Image (cartoon, rainbow, N blue to C red):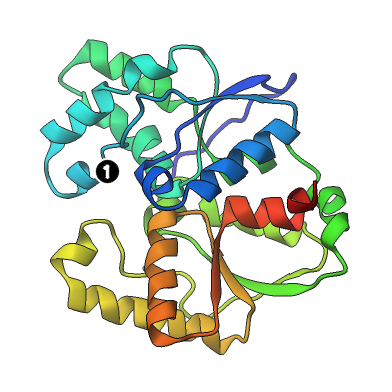
Amino acid sequence: MKPRHYPTGKRPTDVYLFATCLVDLFVPQAGLDAVKLLEREGITVHFPRSQSCCGQPAWSSGNPRQAQEVARAQFGLFDQPWPVIVPSGSCAGMMRHHWPALFEEDPEAAAKATELSERIYELTEFLVRVLKIDLGALGAATASTGESIVLHTSCGARREMGTREHGVEAVDALPGVTRVEHERESECCGFGGTFSLKHPDISGAMVADKLASAVATGCDRLVTADCGCMLNIGHAAEHQGAQLAVEHMASFLWRRTGGDKA
């Protein structure tokens, strides 16, 4: 992960939301909660309706030309110099680190990809490093209701966006929340996008190990900033009858800062 220098001075007044395919199709509440977290900070959230995919499935399947087509279609949608907030560490990593590499042989497109990539932020990263929101004060509303959680960070988000570091910072600032580390926290959940389709038996074994490790802590829920991992672990928990709630970081932060009572 290359070092990042965060903007100082006046807060942004406008941002774009890149919701990701999985938020759009399967977990819309996570996207809505991301918007509410940002709007509560006085920020206007813009959502270009023609946005689609970050191109990661094509890229990770060895189809760079298809990934180029998908990425190129997004360039004109985020034309204002505003931050682009992504409620997924893995999608944010694709857009920030791999989009410029996709167009190495096309200088004009590479310039557009690079400019846009510098404005990409994973949601939790943006909240704690750019907005520097006071989660301790906001969390006072629900401090009397304690719960213990484990974090799960997708592999790409951990390596490319530092999402675990940002997640730990956010969770540890919340009163009434106890973060528990478990033995297999750093391991892949087995989703891996198309990996779970190509190697379902291996994927199933991986998520079973991950789930067992989380459950063994006795925690109340697992929190993650990536919808693919969330769906994979959540479905495994449901299938096995495990007593483990699974929640997206956006919804978790909104709930723990009293948003659902606003």
Q: In the picture, which quadrant includes the N terminus? A: top left
Q: Residue at x 29, y 60 (%)?
A: 192
45 vs 98, left or right, is: right
35 or 192: which is nearer to us?
Answer: 35
Q: Position of residue 74 (x, y in %)?
A: 32, 23
Q: Residue at x 46, y 52 (%)?
A: 27
31 vs 104, left or right, is: right
Residue 170 shows in this picture: no
Q: Which residue is mark 1?
A: 56
Q: Position of residue 255 (x, y in %)?
A: 71, 56
Residue 245 shows in this picture: yes
Q: Label 1: how many residues lie within 10 Å, few (<14), some (14-19) or many (20+)?
A: many
Q: Position of residue 248 (x, y in %)?
A: 54, 57
Q: Position of residue 180 (x, y in %)?
A: 64, 76
Q: Quadrant of residue 42?
A: top right
199 or 34: which is nearer to us?
Answer: 34
64 or 219: which is nearer to us?
Answer: 219
Q: Is residue 29 above or below residue 174?
A: above
101 or 62: which is nearer to us?
Answer: 62
Q: Residue at x 36, y 22 (%)?
A: 114
* Amino acid tagged 1: Gln
Label 1, secondary structure: give it: helix
Q: Residue at x 38, y 53 (%)?
A: 156
Q: Is residue 73 above or below residue 80?
A: below
